[in-house]
Amino acid sequence: MGEAHAAAWRSVGAEWLGCMSLRQTQSEELARRYGMIAYADYQELIDQVDLVDICTPTSEHRSMVLQAAAGRKHVICEKPIALTVQDAQAMIDACTQSGVRLFIGMVVRFFPQYRLAKELVDQGRVGQLGVLRLKRVAYPPSKPVDNWFVDETRSGGMVLDLMIHDFDYARWLAGEVDRVFARRSKAVSSPAQYVQSIVRFKSGALALVEGGWVYPSGIFRTALDISGTAGLIEWNSDQPLPVQTYFPSAPSTITSVGLPVAELTDDPYTTEIRQAYQAILSERPFEVTAEDALEALRIALAARDSLTLGKPVALVGGEENPDRFEAPSNLEH
């Protein structure tokens, strides 16, 4: 992250002075490339600058921000702000008392797609927010030296280090949070993990936030899906820059029943009918059986019962059972 920040600073017109790292060879290399001084001591660097940019492991944020604040230096600090609420509050208080500014790099708010989606929500284009789906999945962090990301005492773990971006973004869109429920699938002998969380907002909106360190090396996928009473916004990292928006058309152009649209050579409804017809002519089994449809109905009925009963309904032995539900004793698998 220090490399990323250094590249960004090069274009803002600020005067570079120096950098510092616990690994002196790293700071010397960065200083050489950007024409800075490689300091061996953090306090010595603070004494020479007006602003410091902290890109260290999260566990170091509190002490380094407090030291900068004591020297009356403005601070830019990478996310997460800290590992605990108490540490974060101490950092904020120290900067306030010293009369310096503290900025935390919640960078997703500055991505053009996420900003455009926020603008559309603020304009009321999607109406009242209903459901947000946010995804941020990468590969397990791997560093040749000091892989602090996988040490939760230093990084806070995947949820704090990665998913925090989307928690922040969701709150930016939907307001204050009422409750959060999360489940995790985790590998036994590696940092690989996947977390799904449901965030309920005081407004009544819901967000499904997914994050993980599970993909093959080099693969990083993000996505957003924001729906409300008047429209839908979609984007994922595999598509071009603009978000996709879906707002109601004029009444004369709307079909009475919504139909999925596919960018395919053959219309999927045509394909479906053709296969069924040919199966009948040739006496072959259907690709989708009546039994498949029956099981789908069972699931739908169970969902309806759940709405009535206000609790989960389990499908047991081929039929829904509203009374058979046991809360899991262990929320992590």
Image: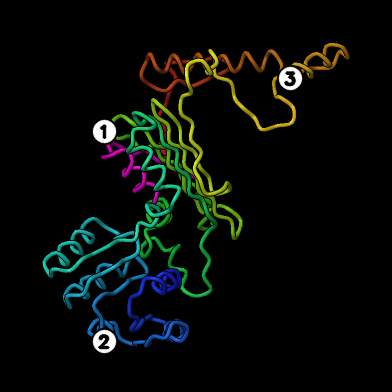
Q: Label 1 amino acid?
A: Lys
Residue sitting at x 36%, y 63%:
153
Q: Is residue 100 left or right of residue 225?
A: left
Q: Label 2 amino acid?
A: Glu
Say which element carries label 1: loop
Tag count: 3
Identify the magenta region.
Answer: 165-185
**Nearer the N terminus, badge 1 or badge 3?**
1
Quarter of the image where one finds residue 276:
top right
- Residue 27 at x, y percent in the picture: 42, 83
Q: Which residue is mark 1?
A: 202
Outermost left residue: 97
Q: What whole-number distance in Å separates the C-alpha atoms at marks 2 and 1?
A: 47 Å
Dot 2 crowding, Cα within 10 Å, few <14, some 14–19, many 20+: few
Q: Which residue is mark 2?
A: 44
Residue sitting at x 23%, y 64%:
102
As displayed, is residue 277 above or below residue 314? Answer: above
Between 155 and 64, the one nearer to me in the picture: 64
Q: Label 3 amino acid?
A: Thr
**Nearer the N terminus, badge 2 or badge 3?**
2
- Residue 162 at x, y percent in the picture: 42, 54
As displayed, is residue 2 above or below residue 261? Answer: below
Dot 1 crowding, Cα within 10 Å, few <14, some 14–19, many 20+: few
Quadrant placement of the N terminus: bottom left
Q: Which residue is mark 3?
A: 270
* Residue 177 falls inside the magenta stretch: yes
Between 156 and 323, the one nearer to me in the picture: 156
**Image mark for residue 331:** none
